[in-house]
């Protein structure tokens, strides 16, 4: 189902509110944002970043206009901070880790998005094999549901390559044997990262290795 957006949105121009085409305004704001924040992205990934940013800005404008009938876009003002604040709130459901603590005091962090990807791969009925990031997914909005799913379907061996070592005393214990009874909790990130920032990071070109 295609997302429906308003045909027009008010824009502040010369101290007057002028109704303008929604798609044109959102495209203009997308160009502004990318020119300001994503100059390091190579041309190979620019189209993907542009399309993702455009969708995020369309949702931002539509949500703002829906919540406040007096909302308007200020193309020549500092709207960036308000957009990123909106993005931070939107990204909070998936900006967190599952922290696993074993009896030796070692702690391991697994990103909620990695667990969501594993859960979707378990769903053999899904026709779409691409990972769908839905902030309303039960695993993202309910920490207990996420931990319950992890314990029911995963073994330590399934996620150990995804886990980031937070703290690990020596000597190591048998993590596979202790996986089920290990304490688990969900911990939100101190600084949430938006979908746009994720794509920008993933699309950064790697430095070419020097010839031997």
Image: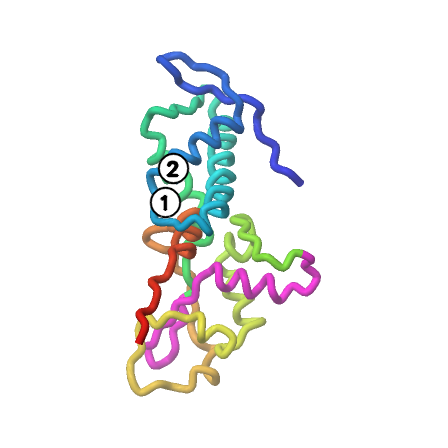
Which residue lies under the disc numbered 1?
38
Q: Secondary structure at mark 2?
A: helix
Identify the image quadrant of residue 188. Answer: bottom left
Tell me the colour scheme of the image: rainbow
Residue 113 is inside the magenta segment: yes
Per the model, the C-alpha gap separating discs 1 and 2 is: 8 Å
Which residue lies under the disc numbered 2?
33
Q: Are marks 1 and 2 in contact (CB under 8 Å)?
A: yes
- Front-most of residues 36 and 145: 36
Q: Which residue is pictured at 43% across the width and 48% down the height?
A: 43
Residue 103 is inside the magenta segment: yes
Instruction: Work out whether 54 lies above or below 145.
Output: above
Q: Secondary structure at mark 1?
A: loop
- Front-most of residues 95 and 129: 129
* Image location (x, y in percent) of residue 28: 44, 30
Q: Which residues are magenta?
A: 99-127
* Image location (x, y in percent) of residue 83: 39, 36
Q: Which residue is pictured at 29% across the width and 84% down the height?
A: 170
- Front-most of residues 165 and 185: 165
Say whether residue 120 is left or right of residue 125: left
Quadrant, the C terminus? bottom left
Instruction: Work out whether 187 lies above or below 81.
Output: below
Quadrant, the N terminus? top right
């Amino acid at each position: 189902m295609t997302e429906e957006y308003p045909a027009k949105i008010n824009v502040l121009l010369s101290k007057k509110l002028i109704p303008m085409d929604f798609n044109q305004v959102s495209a203009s704001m997308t160009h502004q944002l990318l020119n300001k924040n994503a100059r390091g992205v190579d041309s190979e990934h620019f189209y993907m970043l542009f399309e993702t940013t455009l969708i995020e800005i369309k949702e931002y404008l539509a949500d703002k206009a829906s919540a406040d009938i007096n909302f308007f876009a200020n193309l020549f003002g500092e709207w960036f901070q308000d957009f990123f604040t909106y993005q931070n709130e939107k990204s909070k459901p998936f900006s967190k880790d599952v922290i696993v603590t074993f009896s030796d005091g070692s702690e391991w962090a697994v990103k909620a998005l990695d667990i969501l990807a594993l859960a979707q791969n378990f769903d053999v009925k899904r026709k779409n094999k691409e990972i769908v990031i839905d902030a309303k997914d039960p695993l993202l909005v309910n920490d207990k549901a996420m931990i319950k799913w992890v314990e029911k379907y995963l073994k330590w061996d399934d996620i150990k390559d995804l886990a980031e070592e937070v703290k690990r005393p020596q000597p190591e214990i048998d993590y596979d044997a202790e996986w089920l009874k290990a304490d688990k909790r969900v911990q939100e990130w101190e600084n949430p990262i938006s979908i746009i920032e994720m794509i920008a990071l993933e699309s950064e070109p790697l430095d070419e290795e020097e010839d031997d």
